[in-house]
Image (spheres, rainbow, N blue to C red):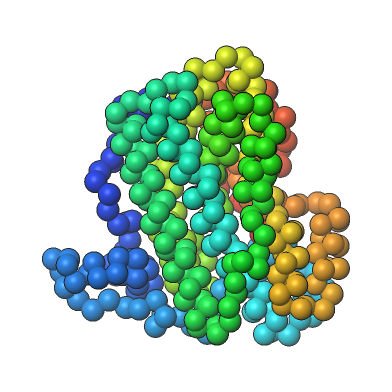
Amino acid sequence: MSSRAPEELTGVQSPELPAYDPDDQAENAVIARLAGNWHRRAAVKREEPNLADLFELARDDYPERILPFRDHPTFRALPPEDRARLLSWAWISYNRTTVLLEGQIVNPAFQLGLDGEFPQPVSELMQRSLAQAMVDEQYHTLMHLNASAVTRRRRGEAFADAALPRPLVVREHEARLASCANERERRLTTLAFATVAEISINAYLNLIADDKEIQPVNSATVRIHNRDEYCHASISAVLAEQVHHALDDGERRYFLQSLVAGLEAFVGNDFMAWHRIMDETGIRGGHEMLDDIQHAGGRKRLVQDFSGLRKLVESLDAVDDLDFDWSRSVTGSDAVSPTR
């Protein structure tokens, strides 16, 4: 994270497919599916692997180690098929959260910047950076939709998105918007939630990106997404810094409060979603298990690494102005977390 001026941002190019390793079968398949018949127009013509061909039925779809109830006796006693089904639902929920986060919070915030709706007008280079990031987010949405689709086909189950509630971060964003006193506060709320998402999403994606035990297509999808987000974090930080500096004292307080609200929502476990999943799976004792975990206290956060946002807040000279317990944050590879 840095406090670079937007003119110092680099790598702004015409829209292109996300970066991937053509020698990695899973990554290559994700991009091939994303691009449709792109490979037939490419200079190098070759047969591309299909996502479904790389799907391994014996592998889990999601890491068991990051379930919030992974050590609960009810979960440990489940037969393998029930545990695997819960993990498939967790993967579908993970993808849905990503899709709605990008489409309903991140891209709308970037669009506000493009439309000049923040106090500090953005430069031409920042406009192009935001537009490029919005194209990236659309690719990410399609990748995660594809990943859920192949899971449904290969598992032979609907795993319907409509069965799940709107993700926690989306619900909290909507609730805060509803409480805003004016349009200016609404814009700052969306910017704050998007800033948290774009700066912290690497920690969220890292939960799966390098996992060697789960479906290779799933980890590859998240890994490819993750690469773009390192660039987006810098763009989001610059945008947040510019807007923050242009606000009056009251607006700065509101923006910082919204950052905290966004962070708490982003890193929290979505127990409402898990209760719906228990409804769908009919796991005996599932609701009671979730109640035990939810009310037991202790570590409840999905993401534990807040270092990116901490650096941004430091650049704003606002660490002491945030009502947030940074002591519960860890960094990098030390971040081992439960999941939503």
- Residue 185, picture quadrant: top right
Q: Nearer the viewer, residue 142 or 8?
A: 142
Task: Please give left or right for residue 41 compared with residue 243 in the image.
Answer: left
Location of residue 311 in the rendering, given as x and y in whole percent from the top left corner: 54, 32
- Residue 188, picture quadrant: top right
Q: Is residue 256 above or below residue 300?
A: above
- Residue 186, picture quadrant: top right
State the residue at coordinates (49%, 81%): 153
Visible residue check, residue 337: no
Task: Please give left or right for residue 162 compared with residue 111 in the image.
Answer: right
Q: Is residue 128 above or below residue 337?
A: above
State the residue at coordinates (53%, 78%): 152
Task: Please give left or right for residue 302 compared with residue 221 in the image.
Answer: right
Location of residue 287 in the rendering, given as x and y in whole percent from the top left corner: 82, 68
Could you tell me which quadrant the C terminus lies in?
A: bottom right
Visible residue check, residue 111: yes
Q: Is residue 137 above or below residue 54?
A: above
Q: Nearer the viewer, residue 175 or 28?
A: 175
State the residue at coordinates (69%, 41%): 175
Location of residue 277 in the rendering, given as x and y in whole percent from the top left corner: 70, 70
State the residue at coordinates (28%, 41%): 11
Q: Residue furthest left?
A: 43
